[in-house]
Image (spheres, rainbow, N blue to C red):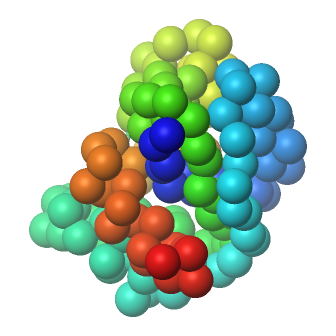
Amino acid sequence: MQRTLVLIKPDGVKRRLIGEIIARIERKGYEVVALKTMRADRAILEQHYGEHKGKPFYEPLLEFMLSGPIVAMVVEGQRVIEGFRSIAGATDPTVAAPGSIRGDLARDQGTKVVQNLVHGSDSEESAAREMGIFFPELR
Ligand code: IDP
Ligand code: MG
């Protein structure tokens, strides 16, 4: 059984899409094994998004993620890392496939960082690292 870290970003919480996003995860057949609403701080986000440091959207990304509460979840199921990224859709919501969370529910807002509702770990290594950041109590 595999686990992944999912975040509902501040745009998803502000737009009252928590229920819609969790419903899609559950309807796909995955299990939400841990969940919390929180405000991320800068230290957590610098760890989480370390790979993007130095990119033009890095500071806007951190500011965006600090702009309001987020929901953090650990989601479980066979091949859930790949499966959640599939139901999330491509990073750019303008071209994310219809039927996906980003494709159905998000679009370009003209901001420096693309607001695309969700984060999902991209590998087993990232999942382990990111779950450790957001759910140290599960270790
Ligand atoms: P992912 O969330 O689909 O894994 P990453 O490449 O890991 O995408 O980027 C992290 C986040 O940074 C994205 O979800 C998006 O919010 C933002 N982002 C990524 N690439 C760009 C870009 O080229 N312009 C603006 N924002 C971006
Ligand atoms: Mg990523």
- Residue at the (43%, 37%) spot, across then down: 81
Residue appearing at x 85%, y 49% in the figure: 16
Rendered residue at 77%/24% (across/down): 27
Q: Is residue 30 visible?
A: yes
**In the image: residue 32, left or right of residue 20:** left
**How many numbered marks, from 0 up?**
0
Residue 124 relative to residue 86: left or right: left
Percent across and percent down for residue 9 are: 60, 57
Res. 116 visible in picture: no
Instruction: Return the residue found at the far left.
Output: 54
Q: Where is 130 relative to 27, above or below? A: below
Residue 20, by quadrant, is top right
Along the line of sight, the residue nearer the viewer: 93 or 20: 20
Q: Residue furthest top?
A: 98
46 relative to 57, above or below = below
Q: Position of residue 123 (x, y in %)?
A: 29, 44
Front residue (pair 85, 77): 77
Task: Please tell me which residue lies in front, 104 or 50.
Answer: 50
Residue 7's place in the image compared with 27, above or below, is below
Q: Residue at x 48, y 49 (%)?
A: 4
Q: Quadrant of residue 68?
A: bottom right
On screen, residue 109 versus residue 13, left or right, reads left
| Residue 133: % across, % down | 43, 76
Q: Position of residue 66 (x, y in %)?
A: 55, 76
